[in-house]
Image (cartoon, rainbow, N blue to C red):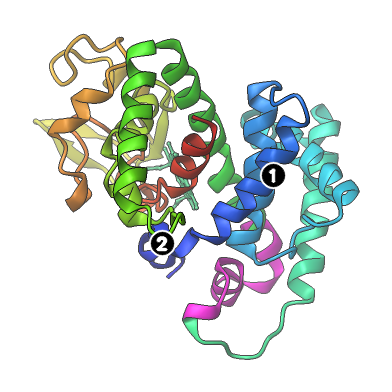
Amino acid sequence: MVKGRLASSRLDNFTPKLQNGFEKQFLKSIGDYGSGDLVDIVRNSMYAAVMDNLFGENVLPTINQKEFMVTAKHFILFDEQFEYGARLPPLFLSKWSAAKRHLLGIFSGVIRGLNQEMKEPQTETLLETLVGLVDKQHAPNYGLLLLWASLANAIPITFWTLSFIHSDQGVLNKLRSDIDNAVQTVQKDGNICYDEEFFRKVPYLKWCILEAIRLKSVGIITRRVVKAFQVKGQTIPEGDMLMLSPFWAHRNPKYFENPNHYNPDRWRNADLEKNLFLDGFVAFGGGRYQCPGRYDLGINILITFKIV
Ligand code: HEM
């Protein structure tokens, strides 16, 4: 159900709230000088806007700047050491464990305060849908996992997209000119609505993001074999771990010509209108646990657009 909610949440569902959220946070993060550290700009612009959109306005603290900064600080630590924290006993990573406890504490409070009244599915936040589906005891853990899953990839991908675009003058010029042309065609009475229709006129922006995802994909996706099965005459026994490396799969010249080169134009061959990626592209995993946010590049699109 949660996956269904994500799959159906196309860009229009996020805009214009996301748009306003990014706008506010982005202007705040670049300050009076119009510059700053790119990682901080991306983080500061995205955290609050994504939290408000997935979990509800100020459900996680986003309005009170001091509370928001404390939450963000704990989230950054939680995210940076997640791979270790998820495997090692708390004893070895006391700061990570404290950050996790802090975030779980916030989610516990939020979930206790959720209005239990039945709502129309369209008006429910993603958190409310999630809490209705999982066991109450572990609801804060699921909430935190959802927050992590939605930000942990979206933020680095936005950072890398912007870095790649700004490292190649040809790509930057093309993107700016496509955006300028789209602005001219949709401008009505001096007002522009940056909705899905607008972004459909700039497919190059989506290609730039997908190309960054291709080059900066996760190293490994793992699955434990729960029942032995056969592949090409070989038995894969129960208990084995199977691993897929999107990072290396995306460097296979059989599928991606000149694979190390950042070339958004290669995405011209993908039928993105039908949500079909390029052959050999496995950045979002596969099967039952495939990323439900895979078609929703709206989060990345808006902030990349804003900064370009
Ligand atoms: C742009 C960036 C993103 C990338 C590259 C990405 C990548 C991934 C990958 C590789 C997985 C593991 C898939 C598997 O094991 O087969 C995953 C899972 C997941 N992703 Fe994403 N993701 C992105 C954005 C998002 C967003 C924006 C959301 C939420 C709004 C999201 C929510 C999730 C969730 C909930 C899971 C766990 C699915 C499950 O275990 O059933 N992701 N993602």
Up-down relation of residue 208 to residue 141 (above or below): above
SS of the residue at dot 2? helix
Residue count near mark 2 (Cα–Cα under 10 Å), binned few <14, some 14–19, many ≥20: some
The amino acid type found where label 1 is placed reads Gln
Q: Disc 2 and disc 1: Cα gap in Å?
A: 20 Å
How dense is the environment of label 1, judged by Cα within 10 Å: few (below 14), some, or many (20 and up)?
Answer: many
Is residue 83 shown above or below 131? above
Residue labelled with disc 1: 25
Circles 2 and 1: CB atoms closer than 8 Å = no
Q: Secondary structure at mark 1?
A: helix
Residue, disc 2: 12
Disc with the residue nearer the chain's start (2 vs 1): 2
Amino acid type, label 2: Asp
The magenta stretch spans which residues? 122-142
- Mark 1: C-beta under 8 Å from nearest atom of ligand 1: no
Query: Residue reaching furthest front?
Result: 189
Q: Quadrant of the N terminus?
A: bottom left
